[in-house]
């Protein structure tokens, strides 16, 4: 199917710790996996994406890993800061359509 | 680049009234999407246009919802008649063609139907 399962739904960490959010999907045709960050009352914004021919991608404190065989991908945030607090959405792209996970509310406690 | 522009930012209306949401995509983008966001259902794709043509409207909840894209720089989402369960944030997003192109979201319209 087209669904994307995202876990956990909420995540609370101490400043400086790492945060990991995981998503799974079932559609083998998926080939594009973006992650969006949405702050309260604002629009979702792309923070990182990965394509199916790549296993890992890193951008400063953010990294994404993809396991196409197992059909799961993860977002890793290291050295978390209070401004990382937001809702994070994974998504998978197939046939022009992006299907989003239900989101993870990340709270970074100072 | 002004980004995707949506109007209005907030809309409060009474049940039964017609609601029209507006969107101006990023210049040069030829794909436009309407999403609805609620706590219960998350981000749902309502309809997708490519080169102004509706490609997939399978996400449109029912006949009360309609969307148009008369030209490359403007789209509308209309709800007639509106119902309280339509209350949500409606996002418009645009991208270059291709399923691996990042989506750029507008700031959304928060709709409240009383």
Image (cartoon, coloured by chain):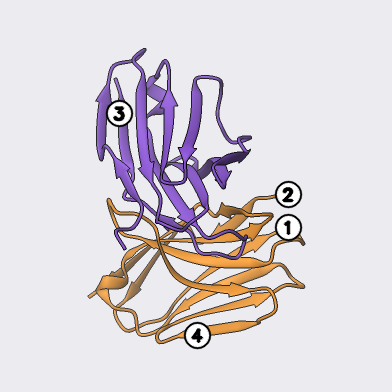
Q: Earlier in the sequence, mark 2 or mark 1?
A: 2
Q: Are marks 2 and 1 in contact (CB under 8 Å)?
A: yes
Identify the element where label 1 is drawn.
loop
Drawn side of residue B17 relative to residue A70, left or right: left
Dot 2: chain letter: A
Question: Which one of the lettered chains is coloured purple?
Answer: B
**Residue ID for mark 1:** A26
**Residue ID for mark 2:** A1
**Residue ID for mark 4:** A58
Identify the element where label 4 is drawn.
strand
Dot 4: chain letter: A
Percent x, y of residue B104 = 42, 58
Rounded to the nearest angstrom, the CA distance separating label 3 from label 2 is 32 Å
- Residue A84 circle label: none
Dot 1: chain letter: A
Q: Are marks 4 and 2 in contact (CB under 8 Å)?
A: no
* Residue A27, picture quadrant: bottom right
| Above or below for A79 versus B20 | below
- Quick one: label 3, few (<14), some, or many (20+) residues within 10 Å? some
* Residue A104, picture quadrant: bottom left
Q: Are marks 4 and 2 on the same chain?
A: yes
Question: Which one of the lettered chains is coloured orange?
Answer: A
Rounded to the nearest angstrom, the CA distance separating label 4 from label 3 is 40 Å
Pick whichever, A105 or B90, lies toward us: B90
- Quick one: label 4, few (<14), some, or many (20+) residues within 10 Å? some
Q: Earlier in the sequence, mark 1 or mark 4?
A: 1
Which quadrant of the rendered structure holds the C terminus of chain A? bottom left
């Amino acid at each position: 199917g087209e669904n994307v399962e995202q876990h956990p739904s909420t995540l609370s960490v101490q400043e400086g710790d790492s945060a990991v959010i995981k998503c799974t999907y079932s559609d083998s045709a998926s080939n594009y996996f973006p992650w969006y960050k949405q702050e309260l009352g604002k629009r979702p914004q792309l923070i990182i994406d990965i394509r199916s021919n790549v296993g890992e991608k890193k951008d400063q404190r953010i990294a994404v890993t993809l396991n196409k065989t197992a059909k799961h991908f993860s977002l890793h945030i290291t050295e978390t800061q209070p401004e990382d607090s937001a809702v994070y959405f994974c998504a998978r792209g197939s046939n022009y359509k992006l299907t989003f996970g239900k989101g993870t509310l990340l709270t970074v406690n100072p | 680049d002004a980004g995707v522009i949506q109007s209005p930012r907030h809309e409060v209306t009474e049940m039964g009234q017609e609601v029209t949401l507006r969107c101006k995509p990023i210049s040069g983008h030829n794909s436009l999407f309407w999403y609805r966001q609620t706590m219960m259902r998350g981000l749902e794709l309502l309809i997708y246009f490519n080169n102004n043509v509706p490609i997939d409207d399978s996400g449109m909840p029912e006949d009360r919802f309609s969307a148009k894209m008369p030209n490359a720089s403007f789209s509308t989402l209309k709800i007639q008649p509106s119902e309280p369960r339509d209350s949500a944030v409606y996002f418009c997003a645009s991208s270059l063609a291709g399923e691996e192109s990042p989506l750029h979201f507008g700031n959304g319209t928060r709709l409240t139907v009383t």
